[in-house]
Amino acid sequence: MVGPAGRRDDAFCDVTMRQSVNLVIPDSTLDHQFRENPRVDGRDGAIRFYAGHPLEAPGGERIGALCIFDSAPRDFSAEEERVLGELAACIEHELSASEELERAAAVQRGLLPKQFLSLPGFDVAGGCAAAPGVGGDFYDWYPVGEGAAVTLADVMGKGIGAAIIAATVRAVLRAVSRRGEIAAAVEAAAVILESDLDGAGTFVTLFHASLDMHTGVLRYIDAGHGLTLIAGADGSASRLSTTSLPLGADVEETWREHAVTLAPGDTLISVSDGVLDLFDGTLASLDEVEAIARSSATSQDLVDTLLALARTSAPDDVTAVVVRRRP
């Protein structure tokens, strides 16, 4: 609250912020500290009664005040003071939770690839538009032998728990996949996360692949994801098969590896289920994604188009990774 001229020193809340307890003024005209304040007899909403409690940021800094006021004097009971303090504590808790989520989101963003993948003969791009807070989507790529590994995963659920599981999946896949063993990497992630996924009652859908840049051969495992397609240079389109369950769905699951070849001009597109919600929410939405791919000059153009749609209409995380073999 500030005075009519915008001066902070006229504000009742400025005094509240300088103390650690409630400030209660039943009748400002009788209070020696405020009776000369221009807001007491001001025409623009006189303040006769005021009660406020200081608000602190998670670091202890005073950042404002929760207050109520009236143009008429009134009493304020001890019970009402207690309720005001509790309401202020609730606001401070929300501020703390919001700050923790923002820090977690910043850490999560830091785990995404920061540089374009140098893969001669291929155009690679990825992006993630996260819903508010933190979530379980992530994409990744990194050099492996004479090519690269590419991953897109989606942890069921939101919040810090999902983000931690996503970070663990990423770390395990990176550690094992550098040896070129796609199935072994997925199996290792499933074993390491078995107890965590079971305890959280969640699972992870996953597309994980290894691309040979010389031959265009893509070896992959689709663990219950089913949202990867190839838009062929010849006008064909095919959704890559998923024959394995998500991580966390069955401890006895085996991970079946498949292989396809990206011909010159072919585009591989893997997306999270949030992309479907940008259209009609069904698998038919992949037809829309394919159409955007064919009208996009580069992989980054396709990603940028999906992220632009996400900023206006996405209720869920939207993640995409695109690999196009140059003609």
Image (cartoon, rainbow, N blue to C red):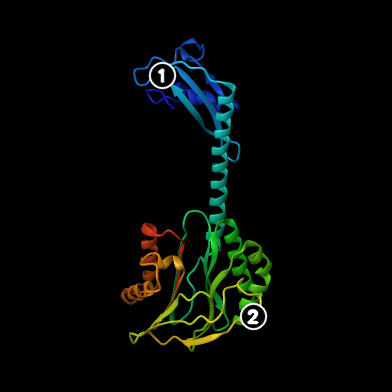
Check contact, mark 1 vs mark 2: CB within 8 A. Answer: no
Q: Secondary structure at mark 1?
A: loop
Disc 1: which residue: 71
Q: Foreground: 307 or 251?
A: 251
Q: Nearer the viewer, residue 90 or 114?
A: 90
The percent position of residue 22, horizontal first and vertical second, equals: 57, 25
Residue 138 horizontal side relative to residue 71, left or right:
right
Q: What amino acid is found at the position of numbered circle 2 in the picture?
A: Ala
- Out of 77 and 33, give the one closest to the viewer: 77
Return the x and y of residue 55 as percentages of the image width and height. Answer: 55, 33
**Which element is circle 2 on?**
helix
Question: Is 149 situated above or below 90?
Answer: below
- Residue lying furthest left: 295
What residue sits right under mark 2 in the picture? 184
Mark 1 vs mark 2, foreground winner is: 1
User: Residue 182: horizontal and vertical position, in percent?
Assistant: 59, 81
Q: Residue at x 43, y 21 (%)?
A: 70
Q: Quadrant of residue 265?
A: bottom left
Whether residue 80 can be seen here: yes
Residue 306, by quadrant, is bottom left
Q: Residues within 10 Å of mark 2 (few under 14, many from 20)?
A: some
Q: Is residue 319 visible?
A: no
User: Dot 1, how many residues are within 10 Å of its Cα: few (below 14), some (14-19), or many (20+)?
Assistant: some
Q: Name the spot of residue 227 as percent of width and height, x first.
A: 46, 75
